[in-house]
Amino acid sequence: MIVGLSRADDAGVYKISDDLALIQTVDFFTPVVDDPYMFGQIAAANALSDVYAMGGVPRTAMNLVCFPAKEMDLSVLREIVQGGIDKVKEAGCVLIGGHTVEDKELKYGLSVTGVVHPDRVLTKGALQAGDRLVITKPLGTGIVNTAIKAGLASQAVTDRVTRQMAALNRQAARVMDGFSVHACTDVTGFGLIGHLAEMVEQSGCSVRIESAAVPRIEEAIEYAAMGLIPAGAYRNREFRAKMVHRGPAVKLSVEDLFYDPQTSGGLLICAAEELAGPLVSALTAAGVEDAVPIGEVLDGPEERIFIE
């Protein structure tokens, strides 16, 4: 066992031989959009992301479905599953089975198995002082999804955020594989602060976030100021607030964005300072247009997150 239950990480990793290890992960959730096909795409992209975050390549997947058969037409299920199948194919992965149970609440996701060389496994807990932090997708999907449910988001915003959530982290992972990256995670339900906190705790360092540099869905700032903040963001703040120091120039609505639970968010990559610029340039050239450096790792055991 290379990565197991002893520490919080994105997936488990089991060494098979000197040059092969298996990555195993599972994730499923309730619908975040009304379109069944796009929900399937998003749920699949979200599950596949954990393999990319560990430095691996997804190979096989299995469907996990909870479906209210007595209340919902089976055509909805077919569209959801087709969305998942198409996203799995896009990832170069193979769907080999799955399981469905009847449930009053609709849920969908995947169990995914990937492969990686044992020496190339990326974990959360290897930050080094002086490293730079790079993120590959903008924040704000949780807040925007709340606005969508409230009927306050435009169709243009809804479509743009839906496409963002359905986008694979495959290309970002491919580019990252060409660099000596120290650590990686994907930004999902615990928000940027929650996932960064896990990296900090396991590394014994502190980090400084440049709030103005963090990419965000601009409409999410507006919605946050209106109070359209998901319950998960409040839980994330309550759990991690003692670790966080917000500078006086940082607005509360901006900090809210950092606690916002993301669905199928981007990769958060930690690399040496001299590699951060070339890494971002390579990501941008490969089509990962929102990739930017957002902060640095500080020396010292404080295990704090400074937002400036």
Image (spheres, rainbow, N blue to C red):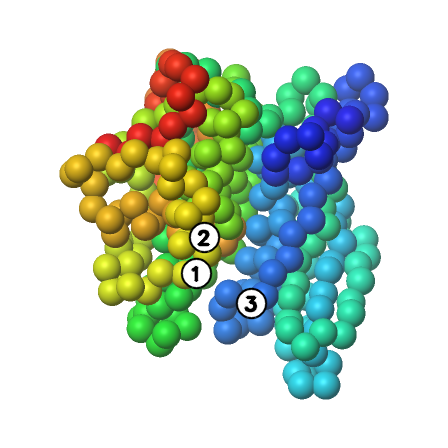
Q: Looking at the image, which residue is at 29% across and 64% down?
A: 227
Q: Quadrant of residue 296?
A: top left
Q: Looking at the image, which residue is at 51% across and 21% down?
A: 203
Q: Which residue is mark 1?
A: 231
Q: Looking at the image, which residue is at 38% across and 28% down?
A: 304
**x then y, percent, for residue 212:** 23, 38
Q: Residue 70 or 46: which is nearer the viewer? A: 70
Q: Quadrant of residue 22?
A: top right
**x then y, percent, for residue 244:** 35, 35
Give the Cα distance between marks 2 and 3.
Answer: 20 Å
Give the Cα distance between marks 1 and 3.
Answer: 16 Å
Q: Which residue is mark 3?
A: 31
Q: Amino acid under label 1?
A: Ala
Q: Residue 76 or 109: which is nearer the viewer? A: 109
Q: Is residue 291 visible?
A: no
Circle 1: is it few (<14), some (14-19), or many (20+) Cα within 10 Å? few
Q: Amino acid under label 2?
A: Arg
Above or below, 74 against 299 in this view is below
Q: Is residue 64 visible?
A: yes
Circles 1 and 2: CB atoms closer than 8 Å: yes
Q: Which residue is mark 2?
A: 235
Instruction: Kindly state the secondary structure of the residue where label 1 is placed.
Output: helix
